[in-house]
Amino acid sequence: MMKTTLISLAALAMLSAMPASGQSKRQSQAAAKAQAAKTAKEAEQRIEQMVAATQKVMFIDSVVVDKDAFLTKYNLCQDAGRLYKYDDFFKAKDQANAYVYVNGLGDKCYFSREDSVGDFNLYTSDNLSGSWTPAARLDGLDDDAGHKSMNYPFMMADGSTLYFAATGDESIGGYDIFATRFDSERGTFLKAENIGMPFNSTANDYMYAIDEFNNIGWFATDRNQSEGKVCIYMFVPSDSRQLYSPDEYSEEQIRSLANLNRIADTWGDGKERQLAMERLKAMQSEKVAMAAKGSFSFVVNDKTTYTKMADFRSKAGLEKFKALQELESKHAALSKALAKARDYYATASTNERNALKNEILQSERQIESLETNIAQTGKEIRNEENKLLK
């Protein structure tokens, strides 16, 4: 009797436990579905907010290429820097999906690197006496931001504004493009912000780069593309962020512009686009010419012209040449800004002219000073090199 009673009690205990277990499982499944629905709704709301805040940008052209060759369509001038695949730049074989940006002077780079669990992080390194220093991870970018797989870095000429792509909580698709600035007081980068539409989408969007000297930008996306293909869009960067006004554009038009359904809709009367296309064509021609003769051309004397850093005989000459490149870069950027200010001055109001007048005069003095420094630095370089060429 006792044995039978024990078995019955055990069986009853098991039977009574089964419904509770099934109920718990159903509750977990229901909670998971509710969370998924909430997440999907939040994502949809976020996308709608981004569509409403679509940036007004002129996209001058686009081209579809193999994903492995997308960097070939970025025709940055030398002063704006260079983009490389990690394996090509560092002569490695284990970072096929990592990328490197090198600044115009060639003495600092920013790059991504994949870790052992398949995540990407961003690093920087300096070129000292021909060798790259150990990689230093960029501080601040992943602090409470939810970023994953940070890749495709590009640093603006100011040495402070960094663009990169990442997945994670702040992304609406796969990769989204983000922007941050370096806080010199804290010594870290500020919390990165999603740059929004039309640059980002529910697909992968990445490798945002700008040539400030020619006022042309690029970014890559696999939206509406077949496997292994990406589309490279070329655009005219805006000095300030302007949005499409709902008073001038319908909701359907803004949505189409956000998705880049037809880039011709961003051209306006076409005049600015034509000028940008001419600049782009000139940049492409210059790139071909520079590739044929070397990365730069510096006349040392009547018989000697340097075309690469390895040509320099003296360390002092090489360091001064890097300084010269920086001076020329600042001169080009300032001259371009001055030309814009003068053009605007011609049609500006009286108050605007009064404000611009001092700015123009100050820029002219700065350019004068730069030209003096450029001439003096060039002379010093030739003196250093000619000592060793005799």
Image (tube, grey):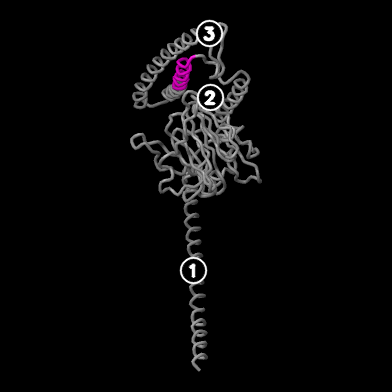
Q: Amino acid at mark 1?
A: Ser
* Mark nearer the viewer, 2 or 3: 3
Name the residue beneath numbered marker 1.
Answer: 28
**Quick check: can you spot residue 162?**
yes
Q: Which residues are magenta?
A: 314-330
> Alpha carbon of mark 1 to alpha carbon of mark 3: how far?
79 Å
User: Disc 1 vs disc 3: Cβ atoms closer than 8 Å?
Assistant: no
> Alpha carbon of mark 2 to alpha carbon of mark 1: how far?
57 Å
Q: Position of residue 248 (x, y in %)?
A: 49, 43
Name the residue beneath numbered marker 3.
Answer: 389
Disc marking residue 11? none
Name the residue beneath numbered marker 2.
Answer: 78
Could you tell me what secondary structure mostly forms the magenta stretch?
Answer: helix
Question: Image point 47% across, 15% down: which residue?
Answer: 317
Q: Is residue 4 above or below residue 324?
A: below
Q: Is residue 312 above or below residue 102?
A: above
Residue 270 versus residue 183: which sits nearer the camera?
Answer: 183
Would residue 188 be found to the left or right of residue 123 on screen?
left
> Alpha carbon of mark 2 to alpha carbon of mark 3: how far?
27 Å
Q: Is residue 323 magenta?
A: yes
* Number of other residues with Cα within 10 Å of mark 1, as a class: few under 14, some 14 to 19, many 20 or more: few
Quarter of image, res 95: top right
Q: Position of residue 106 (x, y in %)?
A: 50, 25
* Mark nearer the viewer, 1 or 3: 3
Q: Amino acid at mark 2?
A: Gln
